[in-house]
Image (spheres, coloured by chain):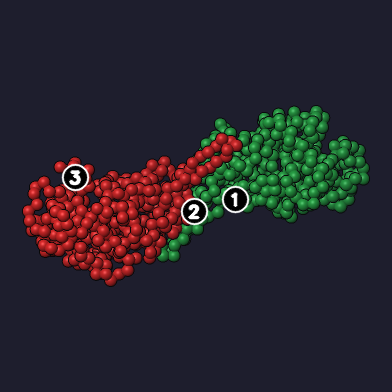
Chain colours: A green, B red
Amino acid sequence: MLALRPVQLTDLPQLQQLARDSLVGVTSLPDDTERLREKILDSCDSFESDVRSPGGENYFFVLQDLVSGRLTGCSEILASTGCNEPFYSLRNRPFSSESRELNIHHGVPALSLCQDLNGQTLLRGFHIDAERVRTPASELLSRARLMFIAAHPHRFAESVITEIVGFSSEDGQSPFWDAIGQHFFDLPYVEAERLCGLQSRTFLAELMPQYPIYVPMLPAAAQACIGRVHPDGQEAFDILEREGFETNSYVDIFDGGPTLHARIANIRSITQSRVAVARQSAQIDARGRYLVSNDSLLNYRAIVAELDLDAEGAVALSPDMLAALGITDGERVRVVAL
Amino acid sequence: MIVRPVAITDLPALLDLARCAGPGFTSLPANEERLAHRVRWAQRTFAGQVERADADYLFVLEDDDRQVVGISALTGAVGLREPWYNYRVGVTVSSAPELGIQRQIPTLFLNNEMTGQSEVCSLFLHPEQRHGHNGRLLSLARLLFVAEFSQLFGEKLIAELRGHADEQGCSPFWDSLGRHFFKKDFSYADQLSGMGNKSFIAELMPRQPLYTCLLTEQAQAVIGKAHPNTEPAMKILGAEGFSHRGYIDIFDAGPVIEAPVSKIRTVRDSQSLTLAIGTPDEQAPVWLIHNRRLENCRVTSARARLHGHSLLVDRLTAKRLQVQPGDTVRAVALLKQGQQAAAA
């Protein structure tokens, strides 16, 4: 069985392996021991802190095989963007080209660097082993974060965003980067993303063009990258889209990948999950698959379980499930249909 | 040859010149009605009936048989009636010292900085007359006119030189920039601007600076580059002290060259002299001479000798200028010193 839990310092060696395998563009998972150690400690502090309103806390989760102890994925929630450093994105909105005298009015799409997405909760750092892609495990890894938000709403903002990795070719070329970032950084895309993971993203963003970029002036290949998802990022996109997330007019400053957003009130795993009392049961007449979490903070756990769930009553869980969730008979759990 | 203000009777000759110049010469359209309007406006300008903002001094080059073979113009001021736009080619620095990154990004800044300056424009000389001093006379006559009537003009003179275009009249700069906002070919935009709609088209374009690295390579390559056809005009003005200081046309990226009026050779070196009639020797240098009149302005070039404050010219020259011995004229050597030596 797989369980999701907060990261611990002892996870460091395994995390480093995950970082090595992660997709370029998942910049929050740097392949650097010191940076990873800092991230883990920062996450531990975040779980322990007594939060009144969302700030720069970063909650880092790992997905672990409870039999082998192996880590098979990780994901993060930044409580609020723009607290420790500005959160930059490119806003894609038409520039209105107008002349009453010439009787012309049309919009020319333009990308402008902005901090419009400051102050929102950010889902990031989603990474799962290749063999677990498109299995219930990746649903768990992504959506257990939403159930965590449901359990601790005061720690998060009213709306949640995520940036999906944008298109790059197999040899690491990003046409979007080549058309824009390259001119301002003089760095290859892969190197820029690597630096982003190691350094603050802010001063990289400060190298980005401050004046609008008019989309029709870009090469066709770069235009095609605007809002385009990397094939390996498609699953992360699909999961959240099913949760009620929608694309908006913001794209990533480096690779043009789309941004998804949803208000807390519209997120399926938050609004449709319900809290119930757990009952230990030797025999479960499984009728469907569910995500189950324990609503705890420091000992937060979430699993995928086959359950027999009726509308209002208690939830029957096997001893293994209770153990994986770190709870005993009579405690409360949060459940939502997979 | 003389340069004089245009007259309405020149209209047939102007139409011939316009046809000869072709559609790329947008300020001289082969359209009788529009030409007539411009000529009448120029006549009012020379008569002192229009404000500086609207002044359009249109001159013609006429030979001794009263054939009009060229035109040139001078405006009182640009941008006082409707905005006058240029890009200035500047630099934006993109810097992250922690990463050792320091990039200088050429950037186009839209501006109206030429507002109130005067423009030399609309020069066209019939191809058969492109010899001797004709081109120089047609161009520099305007500068001598400014020297005489500097109160009618701005502090600077500017000239917008035509930018690079291919044989079909396509401008790579326009195709990479203006076309995205106007959604029409360069030639159409060019025709419209010739009809006085330039500022309307300009206002379709973004006000914020533009990074040149986002233009096509072909467009970047022609920024500030004049069309090869404009080279003779550029040479003449360059010798007078005009230079390119980073301003370009917003449509085709042709250079705007400029000079402070007081620094222009013809203005600075010209002097007021008393005319004497005689026979200048064969080695006498060629002078550019203005009769100091506004409405009956005449400018010509001729061999002349300077004696103290008196300028000796032959009888025909005085006749061309419609002046008598003892009248004062404004004159300057047609060529600057280095050029004199080369010409001799």
Q: As shown in the figure, which amino acid type bears the numbered disc 3?
A: Gln
Kindly identify which residue carries mark 3.
Answer: B340
Could you tell me residue A188's position as x and y percent?
Answer: 55, 34
The secondary element bearing badge 3 is classed as: helix
Marks 3 and 1, Cα distance to the nearest angstrom?
60 Å
Q: Nearer the viewer, mark 3 or mark 1?
A: 3
**Is circle 2 on the same chain as circle 3?**
yes
Q: Which mark is residue B208?
A: 2
Q: Chain of mark 2?
A: B
Kindly identify which residue carries mark 1.
Answer: A114
Marks 2 and 3, Cα distance to the nearest angstrom?
47 Å
Marks 2 and 1, Cα distance to the nearest angstrom?
15 Å
* Residue A259 vertical position relative to residue B14 in the rendered view, above or below: above
Q: Residue furthest bottom?
A: B49
Q: As shown in the figure, which amino acid type bears the numbered disc 2?
A: Gln
Name the residue: 56% across, 42% down: A207
Q: As shown in the figure, which amino acid type bears the numbered disc 1?
A: Cys
